[in-house]
Image (spheres, grey):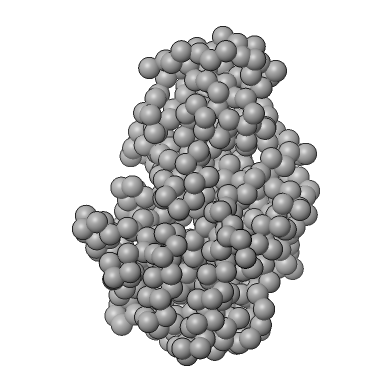
Amino acid sequence: MTSASAAGPFDLVIRGGRVVDPESRRDEVCDLAVTNGRIAAIGAVMGEAAREIDARGLVVAPGFVDLHAHGQTVAADRMQAFDGVTTTLELEAGVLPVALWYENQAKNGRVLNYGTAANWAFARIAAMIGVEPEADLGFMGRHSNDKRWIDNVATDAEMGEILRRLRQGLDEGGIGIGILNAYAPGAGVKEMSSVCSLAADYAVPTYTHVAYASNIDPKSSIEAYTRLVGYAGSTGAHMHICHFNSTSLQDVERAAALIRKAQELGLKITVEAYPYGTGSTVLGATFFADPGFTERTGGPYESIEMVDTGRTFHNRDELLAAQAQDPGSLVLWHFLDVEANPRHRDLLDVSVLYPGGAIASDAMPWTNPDGSVYDGEDWPLPEGTSSHPRSSGTFTRFLRQYVRERAMLPLIDGLAKCTLIPAEILAESTPAMRAKGRLAVGADADIVVFDYDTLTDRAEFKAMNRASAGMRHVIVNGEAVITDGDLVRAARPGRPVRRPVKAA
Ligand SMILES: [Zn+2]
């Protein structure tokens, strides 16, 4: 399916690579030309080029689109670039105020394309405890000791204020509504259904961390998914389920069957997952404090591990004391033991391989040894900075384990879960995404060139800040951020992904 070549000169020609594009189903050795940040030709390219990449023996694919990335710094971008990511979006949480956040990113400069949703939890904090949101994720942790926004049902007045702030976030170009329901599980169904109706009115998705993660009723994962299906059906909102792997626990097969049925009935529900059995969050997360934590999750208190000290817990009292002292501290939560337990491996596979589901990292911010967010630009990252291996290795791990080693799906379908599928989840609401996640003439020149035979994640829980290996060239809007496997330190080609801003 080689197409006729366009005439040069081009800014860049990538020659002789195995070009794999999930949208057109192209999988052939050919050339690809770039001009003015866009793909100008694919096929046998004859024209002159200012720069050429010899891609013989390498795969050329669309840059990966990450729907779920909390890092949102130059350091986080660079680690994700080595994982093949070219667009990194903060959708599950989001921020407020949205306009200020985009201003800050543009001012600082970003390596990857970036974007955010409007943050429902921030709107709740503002409406229910009366503090103004600050446009970074740490805002939530800083107010997690005030339980009113976490546990209480909103009054009518508070609900009005929550919706007003979310509407403002969408009018400022936010790409949907991030619903961290598990972090404010006290919110009522009337409020959630109003938030979902707002999303439906704006024709934007919501991105939900469902209210409960539990194997048993009441407040089971199944209850939470059933509510989410209800919001989709009763409001018409597009409900996107975040990290299907970590909120389903042992019930993922039943959860997948329910979501599949809802999709067959025509409801707009989409799914993402990351290929790890260990999650990461803040110590103050309320589900850890649940008196039935061990029974509900199927795991012991030892499954909760502090990122900075490696400390684990032995009982609820220890955990509650630590929560009161240090609620914003990052912790790992080993919810499925995929290395030791084949049954847990099967459960993880159901979420990662869910048909039509995206791979999304849930990449966490990089933190200093004292727990503060690392916002410097040293490379490699300083000794002792930590996060979660998924912040550096989600996509390369997925391609290595599921596609190459275990051969559970063909490369083109594995790449679809990293590129076209996440782009399509956003395409209806966010026009900018229609030019991403694909290799087509006119599409954005967000391109990865990698060595499929050696591609691998390298980050581990005891060595998180090891970048993945195998990405030879990573191009963002036509500009190289990785060349011959090395970081281009000065590169800041990232652009905002944003919905049209409504004039005030
Ligand atoms: Zn989450």
* Residue 100: percent from left, percent from top: 69, 63
Q: Nearer the viewer, residue 286 or 146?
A: 146
- In the image, what residue occupies the spot 32% across and 51% down? 354
Instruction: Tell me: 333 left or right of 350.
Output: right
| Residue 161 x/y as whole percent | 54, 81
Residue situated furthest top in the rendering: 46
The residue depicted at 49 percent of the width and 61 percent of the height is 176
Count the numbered circles shown. 0
Above/below status of 436 relative to 329: above
Q: Can residue 23 be seen in this view?
A: yes
> From the viewer's perspective, is residue 342 above or below residue 379?
below
- Which image quadrant: the N terminus? top left
Where residue 44 appears, x then y in whole percent? Answer: 50, 12
Q: Between residues 89 and 349, which one lies in front from this camera angle?
A: 89
Percent coordinates x, y for residue 215 in the rendering: 32, 73
Q: Report the residue at 57% width, 66% height from top.
A: 169
Q: Can residue 314 be spotted in the picture?
A: no
- Say left or right for 428 vs 311: left
**Which residue, as the protein is rendered here, is positioned at the far front?**
503
Q: In which quarter of the view is residue 406 placed?
A: top left
Find residue 490 and report its image quarter: top right
Q: Out of 93 and 488, give the one closest to the viewer.
A: 93
Identity of the residue drawn at 49% across and 71% down: 180
Q: Against 365, is 162 above or below?
A: below
Quadrant where the C terminus is found in the figure: bottom right
Q: In this view, does 46 lie to the left or right of 253?
A: right
Observer-nearest of 321 and 53: 53
